[in-house]
Amino acid sequence: MRIRGRTKPKCIRKRTTIMEKILCYSCNKSKNKLSVKKSSLLPINLFMCESCISSKFEPRWVVILSGRQLGSDAVKDFIIKKRYIGTEISASELLV
Ligand SMILES: [Zn+2]
């Protein structure tokens, strides 16, 4: 004879993590917390970590891309103040 004990509901399934390993678009590091931030240069959303957001960084490729699209004046501020991570963006990279 079976004794009816308290059984745990079987419907609890482990949630699969969707956001497995997203790297910060700016510093390329995997962080526990990434936030979606709208780029201040391009009409796109970026995944960035808190430290990059608070430093008002833009990913290097965003600076280059918008420099090509909008002209170097649009990104001058970013380049002079080096508000990106990575090697220095040269003028030739902004010209296509
Ligand atoms: Zn970052």
Image (cartoon, helix red, strand yellow):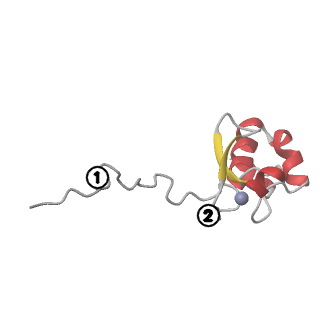
| Residue 30 image label | 2
Q: Quadrant of residue 2?
A: bottom left
Query: SS of the residue at dot 1?
Result: loop
- Is the residue at mark 2 in contact range of ligand 1, meaning its CB lies under 8 Å from it? no
Q: Residue 73 placed where, x, y %?
A: 86, 40
Q: Mark number for residue 55?
A: none
Cα separation, mark 1 vs mark 2, equals 34 Å
The numbered dot on residue 10 is 1
Amino acid type at mark 1: Lys
- Residue 78 in the image: above or below residue 3: above
Given the image, on which type of amino acid does mark 2 rest? Ser
Residue pictured at 78% horizontal, 50% vertical: 53
**Residue at image x 69%, y 45%?**
65
Q: Position of residue 9 (x, y in %)?
A: 31, 51
Q: In terms of image quarters, where does ligand 1 lie?
A: bottom right
Q: How many marks?
A: 2
Report which quarter residue 83 is drawn in: bottom right
Between 82 and 24, the one lying in front of the other is 24
Q: Nearer the viewer, residue 9 or 72?
A: 9
Foreground pick, 7 / 27: 7
User: What percent of the width, then of the height, locates residue 66?
Assistant: 72, 41
Local packing at callout 1 (Cα closer than 10 Å; few below 14, some 14-19, many 20+) is: few
The one of 69 and 47 positioned closer to us in this rendering: 47
Element at badge 2? loop
Residue 95 visible in the picture: no
- The image quarter containing residue 60 is bottom right
List x then y, in percent, for residue 82.
Answer: 86, 57
Foreground label between 1 and 2: 1
* Mark 1 or mark 2, earlier in chain: 1
